[in-house]
Amino acid sequence: MYDRRVELLLDLEHGEGGLADRLYRQLSAAILGGRLRPGEPLPPSRELAAQLRVSRATVTLVYERLIAEGHCTARVGAGTFVSEDARRVPDGSRPSVWGRATGQVASATIARPAYDFRVGVPDAALFPSAAWRRQLTHELDAHLARGAHYGDAAGHTLLREGIAHHIGVARSVSAAPDDVVVTAGAIQAIDLLARVLLRPGDAVAVEEPGYPPVRQVFEAHGARVITMPVDEEGADPSALPPKTRLVYVTPSHQFPLGVVMSRSRRLTLLEWAARNRALVIEDDYDSEHRFRDRPLEPLHVLDADGVVAYVGTFSKSLVPALRIGYAIPPAGLVPALRRARELADGGGDPVAQGALGRLIASGEFAAHMRRARRTYRGRHRMLTEALGDDEHLRMIPSSAGLHVCAEVPSLPSGSARRIRDAAAVTGLALEVLDAYCAERPREGLVLGFGAIPAEHIPDGVRALRSVLRRVS
Ligand SMILES: Cc1ncc(COP(=O)(O)O)c(C=O)c1O
């Protein structure tokens, strides 16, 4: 129940008729429109009369009329309440210049599956809750003591320092705090770069298969999206048209295949971008979770010409709900990107950003990452070993991130979707490779291991194998 002491906003200055008529119309409209909900109390007549500077008799008269017409009921000693069966005008009856079909978004609520191989979901149980709460409280106190102003649109200083330190240590990316623009996740970093750089009709290259929201962001900016094929050496830049303005890649752990872009392709891409004055967006979304070989350096480290915008996120290292990511654009783009963020949303939540800066500075984030990497390494090993010897699956080798990908070469076309649907019936959630293909369909499965506890993996794999046997 909402707090009844909040003043109801009523306008008695305008409209036809006397005060009582106007008050009646305002209150009945609030009930019919749903601003006052069934069961909610009306303000006591004395309080409302004082608030509106009208006589109490006027308010009492209006309440009696609302009761007589069934909008409200009176409860002795308790006051006047909106009737439980008060009729509401259906939402859709309001006209809209946008029509009714816009803004449809798929539901984000997914029931918790028994075997949770969903992609891109980190383990909520690993989140360093106690440390986070402590840092959040410190930062909130500091924020209020400073006067609770808007934050710096490029991000809280403590967090920019923390990010510069973290990517220096974990990813060998050398950046000063002033080179960092904090964003609402990697997706906003990519959106802001697109805003700053693209004009409608510009060509933008993405990986195929790839991360669909990124393609959609570029399309929303009016770009002409072209694709680069991905093989075991990562995205292949050899056929990029010279007029391409922007190239988006995930070189350290290709999404969704998981392959690493070879050094020779990295050098080819950088050399091509410098020659064609294009920007390369390097999305390094989950490669802090690396389990075996020493990583190849990020493109950013190899970039001698200032063509790479490095993008990272805390969605996989902590939780996606934080909505904190970052971009390290080429130096000349920092002011434009900062301004774009300022215009987009004012720079986000300075308290959460400061708390994360403190978490990094205290060493608690690094400790969390060590723990998380150990946990995910174990799950990665279990899953790849268990799936590796299945006759129907051809695992695509990968040694980082929170998901693995397997092709199903021996099965007929359409099998992956049938496997996914049959698995869902048994409570097993996984994704199909095809969901990430925009132009050339591919048969395969993508399995996340961020959310599934290690002890569930053997049973989950057994359940998957029995589905594979049934579908093949
Ligand atoms: C390739 C890729 N980039 C970025 C992200 C994360 O985006 P954000 O930081 O906006 O949550 C994801 C999430 O699944 C992803 O798969």
Image: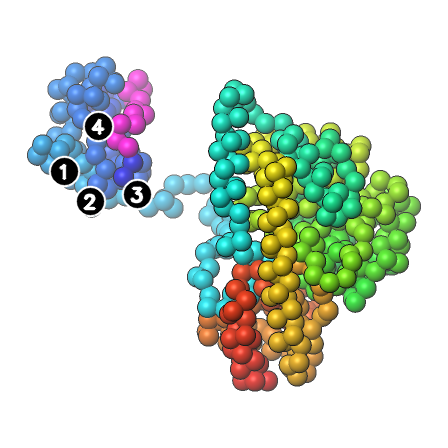
Q: Is residue 39 left or right of residue 101?
A: left
Measure the alpha-carbon separation of dots 1 and 4: 13 Å
- From the image, tell me which residue sits under label 4: 43
* Mark 4 surroundings within 10 Å by alpha-carbon count, few (fewer than 14), some (14 through 19), many (20 or more): some
Is any part of residue 282 visible from this angle?
yes
Give the amino acid type for the residue marked by disc 4 in the picture: Pro
Tell me if residue 353 is in the magenta stretch: no
Give the amino acid type for the residue marked by disc 2 in the picture: Glu
On screen, 310 above or below 439?
A: above
Mark 1 or 4: in front is: 4
Measure the alpha-carbon separation of dots 3 and 1: 19 Å
Q: Are marks 1 and 2 in contact (CB under 8 Å)?
A: yes
Quadrant occupied by the C terminus? bottom right
Please state the horizontal and vertical placement of residue 312, each as a whole percent of the image.
68, 46
Please state the horizontal and vertical placement of residue 91, each as a whole percent of the image.
36, 44
Q: Is residue 271 left or right of residue 228?
A: right
Is any part of residue 353 visible from this angle?
no
Magenta segment: 3-15
Measure the alpha-carbon separation of dots 3 and 2: 15 Å
Q: What kind of secondary structure does the magenta stretch mostly adopt?
A: loop
Give the amino acid type for the residue marked by disc 1 in the picture: Thr
Q: Which mark is residue 84?
A: 2
- From the image, tell me which residue sits under label 3: 89
Measure the alpha-carbon separation of dots 1 and 2: 9 Å
Mark 3 or 1: in front is: 1
